[in-house]
Image (tube, rainbow, N blue to C red):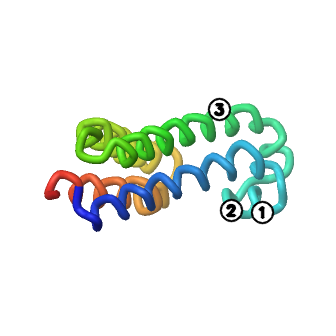
Amino acid sequence: MTTLATVAVGLVAALHLYFLVLEMFLWATPFGMRTFGLTREFAVASRSLAANQGLYNGFLAAGLAWGILLGAGGHTITIFFLACVAIAGVFGGITASRKILWIQALPGAIALALVLLA
Protein backbone atom coordinates (compact mmCIF):
# COMPACT_ATOMS: atom_id res chain seq x y z
CA MET A 1 0.00 0.00 0.00
CA THR A 2 1.07 3.54 -0.52
CA THR A 3 1.68 5.73 2.47
CA LEU A 4 -1.56 7.64 1.85
CA ALA A 5 -3.59 4.42 1.73
CA THR A 6 -1.92 3.13 4.89
CA VAL A 7 -2.64 6.38 6.74
CA ALA A 8 -6.28 6.29 5.60
CA VAL A 9 -6.67 2.69 6.80
CA GLY A 10 -5.04 3.65 10.11
CA LEU A 11 -7.46 6.54 10.54
CA VAL A 12 -10.45 4.28 9.87
CA ALA A 13 -9.06 1.78 12.41
CA ALA A 14 -8.61 4.58 14.97
CA LEU A 15 -12.15 5.77 14.31
CA HIS A 16 -13.47 2.29 15.06
CA LEU A 17 -11.45 2.11 18.27
CA TYR A 18 -13.12 5.38 19.24
CA PHE A 19 -16.52 3.84 18.46
CA LEU A 20 -15.58 0.87 20.67
CA VAL A 21 -14.83 3.18 23.61
CA LEU A 22 -17.98 5.23 23.07
CA GLU A 23 -20.27 2.22 22.81
CA MET A 24 -18.68 -0.11 25.35
CA PHE A 25 -17.63 2.31 28.08
CA LEU A 26 -19.22 5.74 27.58
CA TRP A 27 -22.70 4.85 26.30
CA ALA A 28 -24.59 5.75 29.49
CA THR A 29 -22.35 8.65 30.52
CA PRO A 30 -23.31 12.28 29.87
CA PHE A 31 -20.76 12.41 27.01
CA GLY A 32 -22.07 9.22 25.41
CA MET A 33 -25.71 10.21 25.78
CA ARG A 34 -24.99 13.65 24.28
CA THR A 35 -22.99 12.10 21.42
CA PHE A 36 -25.78 9.70 20.46
CA GLY A 37 -28.74 11.88 21.50
CA LEU A 38 -29.99 9.40 24.11
CA THR A 39 -32.16 9.74 27.16
CA ARG A 40 -30.79 8.32 30.41
CA GLU A 41 -33.49 5.65 30.47
CA PHE A 42 -32.77 4.47 26.93
CA ALA A 43 -29.00 4.51 27.48
CA VAL A 44 -29.27 2.36 30.59
CA ALA A 45 -31.76 -0.04 28.97
CA SER A 46 -29.66 -0.47 25.81
CA ARG A 47 -26.21 -0.53 27.42
CA SER A 48 -25.55 -4.23 26.72
CA LEU A 49 -26.63 -3.89 23.08
CA ALA A 50 -24.32 -0.91 22.63
CA ALA A 51 -21.43 -2.81 24.24
CA ASN A 52 -21.99 -5.66 21.79
CA GLN A 53 -21.95 -3.20 18.90
CA GLY A 54 -18.79 -1.62 20.29
CA LEU A 55 -17.08 -5.00 20.41
CA TYR A 56 -17.83 -5.51 16.71
CA ASN A 57 -16.29 -2.11 15.97
CA GLY A 58 -13.23 -3.29 17.85
CA PHE A 59 -13.03 -6.36 15.61
CA LEU A 60 -13.12 -4.10 12.56
CA ALA A 61 -10.29 -2.00 14.00
CA ALA A 62 -8.29 -5.14 14.78
CA GLY A 63 -8.74 -6.47 11.26
CA LEU A 64 -7.59 -3.20 9.75
CA ALA A 65 -4.57 -3.07 12.06
CA TRP A 66 -3.77 -6.67 11.11
CA GLY A 67 -3.85 -5.75 7.43
CA ILE A 68 -1.54 -2.79 8.02
CA LEU A 69 0.90 -4.88 10.06
CA LEU A 70 1.10 -7.51 7.33
CA GLY A 71 2.06 -4.85 4.78
CA ALA A 72 1.81 -6.03 1.19
CA GLY A 73 0.75 -9.48 2.41
CA GLY A 74 -2.28 -7.95 4.13
CA HIS A 75 -3.78 -6.33 1.05
CA THR A 76 -6.70 -8.77 0.79
CA ILE A 77 -7.39 -8.63 4.54
CA THR A 78 -7.43 -4.83 4.44
CA ILE A 79 -9.82 -4.82 1.49
CA PHE A 80 -12.15 -7.27 3.27
CA PHE A 81 -12.30 -5.25 6.49
CA LEU A 82 -12.71 -1.92 4.68
CA ALA A 83 -15.57 -3.43 2.68
CA CYS A 84 -17.14 -4.56 5.98
CA VAL A 85 -16.76 -1.01 7.35
CA ALA A 86 -18.37 0.55 4.28
CA ILE A 87 -21.25 -1.95 4.18
CA ALA A 88 -21.90 -1.57 7.91
CA GLY A 89 -21.85 2.21 7.49
CA VAL A 90 -24.38 2.10 4.66
CA PHE A 91 -26.62 -0.26 6.63
CA GLY A 92 -26.38 1.96 9.72
CA GLY A 93 -27.06 5.02 7.61
CA ILE A 94 -30.23 3.44 6.25
CA THR A 95 -31.51 1.85 9.47
CA ALA A 96 -30.25 4.05 12.32
CA SER A 97 -28.98 7.51 11.38
CA ARG A 98 -27.94 9.21 8.15
CA LYS A 99 -24.92 10.63 10.00
CA ILE A 100 -23.41 7.13 9.95
CA LEU A 101 -23.04 7.44 6.18
CA TRP A 102 -20.65 10.36 6.68
CA ILE A 103 -18.95 9.18 9.87
CA GLN A 104 -18.37 5.52 8.98
CA ALA A 105 -19.28 4.63 5.38
CA LEU A 106 -17.55 7.54 3.65
CA PRO A 107 -14.17 7.23 5.43
CA GLY A 108 -14.27 3.46 4.86
CA ALA A 109 -15.09 3.91 1.18
CA ILE A 110 -12.35 6.50 0.70
CA ALA A 111 -9.77 4.28 2.40
CA LEU A 112 -10.97 1.31 0.31
CA ALA A 113 -10.58 3.31 -2.90
CA LEU A 114 -7.07 4.37 -1.89
CA VAL A 115 -6.08 0.79 -1.09
CA LEU A 116 -7.48 -0.46 -4.40
CA LEU A 117 -5.61 2.27 -6.28
CA ALA A 118 -2.34 1.61 -4.44
Label drawn at residue 31: 1
- Which residue appears at 28% of the width and 67% of the height? 4
Image: 49 above or below 116 = above
| Residue beneath disc 3 | 52
For the residues labelled 3 and 2, the Cα–Cα distance comes to: 18 Å
Mark yes or no: residue 57 visible: yes
Residue placed most toward the observer, 17 or 49 = 17
Which kind of residue does numbered mark 2 sit on? Thr
Find residue 1 and report its horizontal and vertical position in percent.
Answer: 23, 55
Label drawn at residue 35: 2
Find residue 97 and report its horizontal and vertical position in percent.
Answer: 51, 53
Residue placed most toward the observer, 38 or 1 = 1
Element assignment for label 1:
helix
**Dot 3 or dot 2, earlier in sequence:** 2
Circles 3 and 2 in contact, beta carbons < 8 Å = no
Element assignment for label 2:
helix
For the residues labelled 1 and 2, the Cα–Cα distance comes to: 6 Å
- Which residue appears at 16% of the width and 57% of the height? 118
Residue placed most toward the observer, 113 or 31 = 113
Find residue 12 and report its horizontal and vertical position in percent.
Answer: 44, 56
Mark 1: give few (<14), some (14-19) or many (20+) Cα within 10 Å.
few
For the residues labelled 3 and 1, the Cα–Cα distance comes to: 19 Å
Circles 1 and 2 in contact, beta carbons < 8 Å = yes
- Which residue appears at 24% of the width and 37% of the height? 76
